[in-house]
C-alpha cells in the first residue's frame, strides 16, 4: 500500500483558469493568487512533506473542464479533482447561501442577509458533494486543508468518516460577534459551528475573529473553551490566528519590471494632476466604496485649494453582479461619481476617474507604484491584501497608505494612517495629512510596514499554518493515548 502523506487542498475555486482554443484544445492557465502561489511553491521546491510530489486540489467546476474518460486534470504541480455541482444547485449554494447569507452576516450586514431555507439546504448538499468525493479519496496520514466560508460544514463531514485524519480549516472572512452570529436560525448556527470544529485547527486572520468564534462555540454548543482550545469529547480543537500575507518579493520586483515601467509612464501621461490617490477593490458593499467617495467629496468641499491638483482613481473590479444588492450598488456608485465630477470638475479636470473593470497584473503594478496615496476604506474586511500589496510594491519607499481600522490588515500595518470610513471629517483630514506628508516620514512609515510583510509573507503563513496543524495533530494523538 502506498502510504505517502499527501497534501489535499479544498477550496471553492480550482487553481486553474480553463479555456479552449478554436481547435477545441484545452488550455490550463494557473491562477496567480497568493494562496495558489504559496501552495505551488511547496510543489516547485519538491517539498511537500519532504517529498517531490504533486498537490491534490478539490474545487468546484463545471463538467466541461474534463475530457472524455477523465476524472481529474493535472499539470506539473497540481492534480485537480473537479467537484461537479449542477447549475441550479450551485446558484442556490454559492450565490444564495454563501454570498447572500454567510457573506453579509459575517460582514455585519444583517439587513442584507437572506434567511432562505432552500439556500441552506443547497449549502448542505453542496458540502456533501465535496465530502463524498474527498471521503472516497482520502487515506490515513493525508493532510486536508479546507479554505473558506463556502465549506464550513465540510470538516465535520470528513471527520465523521475519518476520525484520525489531519484536517485544517481556514476562514478568510471575519467571524462576527455572537450577537450577530446568533441572528442565523439556531439549527444553522449549530450545524455550521459543528462543521468547523470537525477540523483539528481552525484559523482566522485576527485574534478578535478567533475569540468571537470561540465565544459562539461556547454559547451555542456548550463546549469548554480556553483562549485557543475547544475541549470536545475525545478531541481538542485548536483555534489560532494566522494573518494571511502576500508574495512580498514578487510585489517588490514590480516597481522595476519593464512592463510596469512602460505602463506607469503611459498612465502618468494621462494623469496630469500633482497628486494621485488610488484605490482598487471588488465591487462589494463591505469595501466602503460609497463612504470613500463621500469622504473625498467632503475633502473637496473643505479644501478648495486642492481643486485641479488631485485626482482619485478608483478601480472597481466586477463581482457578483447577478446579486441584486451588487447591481444596485454599482448604480449608486456611478451616481456618486457623476455627482462629484459634475459639482467640482472643470473642463480640464475630473476629480474622480472611475473604472469598472479588471486590471492586468502590470496595470495594477503601475497604479500601485505611481500613487501618492492609497485610500482603502472597507467597512469590514477579513484582511485586505490590496493594502499589503501597495506597501510591498513601493521599492522607492514613497507613498502613503490610508487604511480603515475595520480591515484585518490594520493590526499589522502600523505605518498607515488609520481611519474610520464612516467619519468623513477624519477621512478628509487623513487625505490632507497624506498629501502633505514629507518624504522622510513617508519612508519611515513604509519601512516599518515593509519590514512586517517581508518577514511574514505568504510562504511563512502557509508554513506556519501547516506546522501548527502537525503540532496539534501530535498533541491529539498523545491525548487519545492517555
Ligand atoms: P477579497 O475580498 O477579494 O478577499 P482582498 O484581500 O483585497 O479582497 O484581495 C483582492 C485581491 O484581488 C488582491 O490580491 C488583488 O491584487 C486582486 N485584484 C485586485 N484588483 C484586481 C484586478 N483588477 N484584477 C485582478 N486582480 C485584482 C477575501 C477577503 C479578504 C482577505 C482575502 C484573503 O474578503 O479580507 O484578505 O480573501 O484571505
Image (cartoon, rainbow, N blue to C red):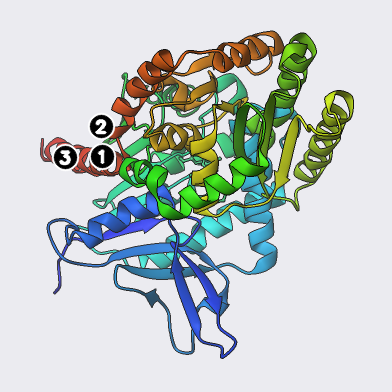
Position above or below: 307 against 244: above
Q: Residue at x 36, y 56 (%)?
A: 9
Callouts 3 and 1 close, C-beta under 8 Å: no
Is 211 in front, or is 49? 49
SS state under label 3: helix
Give whichever of discs 2 and 1 has the lower sequence position: 2
Q: Which mark is residue 105?
A: none
Depicted 196 relative to depicted 397: above or below = below
Q: Element under label 1? A: helix
Disc 3 from disc 2: Cα separation: 36 Å
Q: The C terminus is located in which quarter?
A: top left
Count the labels in the image: 3
The residue pinned by badge 3 equals 480
Which quadrant would residue 125 be assigned to in this image?
bottom right
Q: Mark 3 or mark 1: name the one nearer the start of the chain.
A: 1
Q: Nearer the viewer, mark 3 or mark 1?
A: 1
User: Against 439, is 5 above or below?
Assistant: below
> Which label lies toward us, 3 or 2?
2
Residue 455 got which mark? 2
Indicate the secondary structure of the residue bearing disc 2: helix
Label 3 within 8 A of ligand 1 by Cβ? no
Residue at image point 23% right, 43% down = 463
Q: Dividing the picture into quarters, in which one does residue 406 lie?
A: top right
Measure the C-alpha gap from mark 3 to mark 1.
Answer: 30 Å
Give residue 460's mark: 1
Contact between marks 2 and 1 (CB within 8 A): the answer is yes
Please state which of residues 395 and 420 is positioned toward the viewer in this rendering.
395
Q: Is residue 15 left or right of residue 473?
A: right
Does residue 72 appear to the left or right of 381 in the view shown? left
Amino acid at each position: 500500500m502506498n502510504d505517502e502523506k499527501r497534501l489535499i487542498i479544498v477550496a471553492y475555486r480550482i487553481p486553474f483558469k480553463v479555456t479552449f482554443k478554436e481547435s477545441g484544445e484545452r488550455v490550463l492557465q494557473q491562477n496567480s493568487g497568493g494562496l495558489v502561489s504559496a501552495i505551488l511553491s511547496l510543489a516547485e521546491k519538491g517539498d511537500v512533506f519532504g517529498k517531490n510530489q504533486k498537490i491534490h486540489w478539490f474545487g468546484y467546476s463545471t463538467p466541461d473542464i474534463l475530457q472524455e474518460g477523465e476524472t481529474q486534470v493535472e499539470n506539473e504541480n497540481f492534480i485537480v479533482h473537479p467537484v461537479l455541482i449542477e447549475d441550479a444547485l450551485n446558484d442556490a449554494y454559492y450565490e444564495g447561501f454563501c454570498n447572500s447569507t454567510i457573506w453579509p452576516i459575517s460582514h455585519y450586514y444583517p439587513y442584507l442577509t437572506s434567511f432562505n431555507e432552500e439556500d441552506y439546504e443547497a449549502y448542505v448538499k453542496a458540502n456533501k458533494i465535496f465530502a463524498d468525493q474527498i471521503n472516497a479519496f482520502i487515506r490515513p496520514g493525508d493532510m486536508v486543508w479546507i479554505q473558506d466560508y463556502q465549506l464550513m460544514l465540510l470538516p465535520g463531514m470528513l471527520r465523521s468518516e475519518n476520525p484520525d485524519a489531519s484536517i485544517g480549516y481556514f476562514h478568510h472572512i471575519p467571524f462576527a460577534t455572537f450577537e450577530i452570529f446568533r441572528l442565523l436560525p439556531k439549527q444553522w448556527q449549530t450545524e455550521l459551528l459543528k462543521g468547523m470544529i470537525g477540523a483539528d485547527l481552525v484559523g482566522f486572520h485576527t485574534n478578535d475573529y478567533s475569540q468571537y468564534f470561540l465565544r459562539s462555540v461556547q454559547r451555542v454548543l456548550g463546549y469548554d473553551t480556553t483562549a485557543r482550545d475547544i475541549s470536545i469529547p475525545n478531541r481538542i480543537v485548536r483555534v489560532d490566528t494566522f494573518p494571511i500575507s502576500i508574495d512580498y518579493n514578487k510585489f517588490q520586483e514590480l516597481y522595476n519590471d519593464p512592463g510596469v515601467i512602460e505602463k506607469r509612464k503611459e498612465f502618468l501621461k494621462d494623469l496630469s494632476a500633482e497628486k494621485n490617490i488610488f484605490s482598487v477593490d471588488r465591487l462589494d458593499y463591505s469595501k466602503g466604496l460609497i463612504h470613500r467617495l463621500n469622504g473625498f467629496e467632503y475633502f473637496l468641499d473643505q479644501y478648495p485649494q486642492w481643486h485641479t491638483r488631485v485626482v482619485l482613481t478608483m478601480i472597481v473590479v466586477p463581482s457578483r453582479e447577478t446579486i441584486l444588492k451588487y447591481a444596485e450598488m454599482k448604480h449608486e456608485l456611478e451616481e456618486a461619481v457623476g455627482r462629484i465630477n459634475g459639482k467640482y470638475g472643470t473642463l480640464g479636470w475630473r476629480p474622480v476617474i472611475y473604472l469598472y473593470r479588471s486590471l492586468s497584473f502590470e496595470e495594477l503594478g503601475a497604479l500601485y507604484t505611481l500613487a501618492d496615496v492609497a485610500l482603502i476604506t472597507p467597512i469590514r474586511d477579513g484582511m485586505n491584501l490590496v493594502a499589503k500589496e501597495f506597501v510591498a510594491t513601493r521599492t522607492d519607499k514613497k507613498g502613503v497608505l490610508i487604511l480603515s481600522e475595520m480591515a484585518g490588515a490594520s493590526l499589522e500595518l502600523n505605518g498607515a494612517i488609520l481611519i474610520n470610513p464612516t467619519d468623513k471629517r477624519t477621512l478628509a483630514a487623513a487625505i490632507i495629512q497624506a498629501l502633505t506628508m514629507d518624504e522622510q516620514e513617508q519612508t519611515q512609515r513604509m519601512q516599518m510596514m515593509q519590514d512586517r510583510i517581508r518577514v511574514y509573507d505568504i510562504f511563512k503563513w502557509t508554513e506556519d499554518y501547516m506546522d501548527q496543524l502537525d503540532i496539534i495533530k501530535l498533541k491529539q494523538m498523545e491525548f487519545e493515548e492517555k
